[in-house]
Image (tube, rainbow, N blue to C red):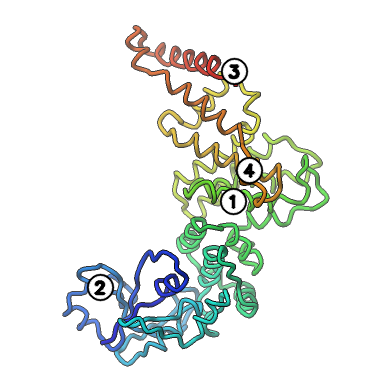
């Protein structure tokens, strides 16, 4: 039995990046031997085991042979004679096909270290095209490593285009698509993920709602936003990634102007119209991928109300309290900060056009929203009950006092 550290842990170590998980490959062993050493089997279709103490994943070296469609259409062989080189060959990218032994000696049969130094994402072999999920994985790694100036090799891009044209993406499950997208949204540069998918044609297959933003006619006029909406949406996503690590905030930012897909063909529209038209698009997308309810709900809130925040100086105290009621901010106060951040990402890109120029720009509307909510929060239900109000009159008095608190508190802003 020989044990090697493989995959992301080796790659990230060589890049001086934090190592989140360690995966190991075991050469020359069998399931029975692993059981006898106290390992616990966790892989249903693959020979993957948990270490009895560290609980890290140890997988028997294996080869894969394509026999069907999609990422599950493989026959796996994991006999003791499968070599380390054979196991590494089935991996997606050369930078993920390196291994280290217990002494730290690097095994790199496919040039991963060279590509790492050259900042290249390159497929290991022609077997790459047997698994359509790898298109999404390459896009995710491009997003994950964009800050280190990694680029996709031209031959890998061409292979991804060919794979997309073959129709293999249709065999991916919605769960796998969302899982990769979720991981990509949490990278430092999530916008790169969607750019890569667009460039190989996969965005149109997987996320036609987002791809449609690229198809908008350049002759249509909406305020000052001619011909830039997709760049706006993805630049907003790039900016909010600097402001928040929350998945739902990033997802909501990406989709907050999605309604323009339906409304831009007109000469001129009101923002309220495209906010409303975005609702069914977001609902349909979230339903298609079984996206968690809390993520969907924030996306709907941001889509509907980010323009209200942009024009918050025109809102009465009564309207602001109604907004807080509508988004259930009393029970979920984090939504105020989330709405402020997503609106800021939208407004700052709209106004200045380049993420690189936005670092020191103040979005005062966000602070206005936060202050208004803080003032309203200072009114406590228990004080109203102690004052003798009962039943429906508690709610009425609570609303009245919140409005007064906002009016007084914002008078000098």
Pointer 3 or 1: first along the chain: 1
Q: Secondary structure at mark 1?
A: helix
Q: Secondary structure at mark 4?
A: helix
Q: Secondary structure at mark 2?
A: strand
- The tag on residue 237 is 1
- The tag on residue 344 is none
Measured Cα–Cα span from mark 3 to mark 2: 65 Å
Quarter of image, res 225: top right
Of the two numbered discs 2 and 1 in the rendering, the one whose residue sits closer to the viewer: 1
Callout 2: few (<14), some (14-19), or many (20+) C-alpha neighbours within 10 Å? some
Measured Cα–Cα span from mark 1 to mark 4: 9 Å
* Label 4–label 3 contact, CB within 8 A: no
Question: Is 355 situated above or below 168?
Answer: above
Measured Cα–Cα span from mark 2 to mark 4: 47 Å
Residue placed under numbered mark 2 in the picture: 41
Q: Residue at x 59, y 67 (%)?
A: 149
- The tag on residue 346 is 4
Measured Cα–Cα span from mark 2 to mark 1: 40 Å
Q: Residue furthest top?
A: 388
Horizontal placement of 306 versus 25: left or right?
Answer: right
- On-image quarter of the N terminus: bottom left
Pointer 1 or 4: first along the chain: 1
Q: Name the one closer to the observer, 396 or 321.
A: 321
Q: Position of residue 385 (x, y in %)?
A: 34, 12
Residue placed under numbered mark 3 in the picture: 412
Q: Position of residue 406 (x, y in %)?
A: 52, 18
Pointer 2 or 1: first along the chain: 2
Q: Residue at x 58, y 70 (%)?
A: 150
């Amino acid at each position: 039995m020989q044990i090697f550290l493989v995959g992301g842990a080796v790659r990230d170590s060589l890049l001086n990046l934090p190592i989140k998980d360690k995966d190991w490959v075991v050469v020359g062993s069998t399931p029975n031997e692993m059981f006898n050493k106290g390992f616990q089997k966790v892989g249903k279709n693959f020979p993957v085991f948990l270490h009895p103490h560290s609980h890290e994943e140890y997988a028997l070296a294996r080869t894969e042979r394509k026999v069907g469609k999609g990422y599950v259409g493989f026959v796996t062989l994991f006999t003791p004679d499968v070599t380390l080189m054979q196991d590494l060959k089935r991996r997606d990218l050369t930078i993920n096909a390196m291994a280290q032994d217990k002494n730290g000696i690097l095994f790199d049969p496919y040039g991963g270290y060279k590509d790492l130094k050259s900042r290249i994402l390159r497929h290991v072999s022609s077997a790459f095209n047997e698994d359509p999920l790898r298109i999404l994985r390459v896009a995710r790694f491009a997003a994950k490593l964009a800050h280190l100036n990694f680029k996709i090799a031209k031959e890998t891009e061409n292979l991804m285009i060919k794979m997309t044209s073959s129709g293999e993406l249709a065999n991916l499950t919605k769960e796998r698509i969302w899982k990769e997208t979720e991981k990509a949204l949490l990278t430092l540069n999530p916008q790169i993920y969607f750019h890569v998918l667009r460039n190989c044609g996969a965005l149109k297959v997987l996320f036609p709602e987002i791809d449609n933003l690229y198809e908008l006619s350049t002759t249509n006029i909406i305020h000052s936003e001619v011909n830039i909406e997709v760049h706006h949406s993805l630049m907003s996503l790039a900016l909010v990634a600097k402001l928040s690590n929350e998945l739902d905030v990033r997802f909501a930012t990406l989709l907050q102007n999605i309604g323009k897909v339906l409304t831009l063909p007109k000469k001129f529209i009101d923002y309220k119209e495209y906010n409303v038209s975005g609702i069914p698009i977001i609902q349909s997308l979230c339903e298609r991928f079984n996206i968690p309810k809390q993520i969907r709900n924030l996306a709907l809130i941001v889509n509907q109300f980010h323009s209200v925040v942009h024009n918050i100086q025109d809102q009465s105290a009564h309207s602001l309290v109604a907004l807080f009621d509508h988004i259930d901010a009393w029970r979920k106060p984090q939504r105020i900060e989330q709405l402020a951040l997503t609106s800021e990402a939208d407004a700052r890109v709209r106004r200045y056009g380049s993420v690189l120029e936005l670092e020191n720009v103040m979005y005062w509307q966000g602070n206005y929203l936060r202050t208004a909510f803080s003032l309203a929060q200072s009114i406590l239900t228990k004080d109203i009950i102690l004052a003798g109000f009962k039943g429906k009159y508690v709610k009425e008095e609570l609303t009245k006092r919140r409005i007064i608190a906002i009016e007084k508190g914002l008078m000098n802003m």
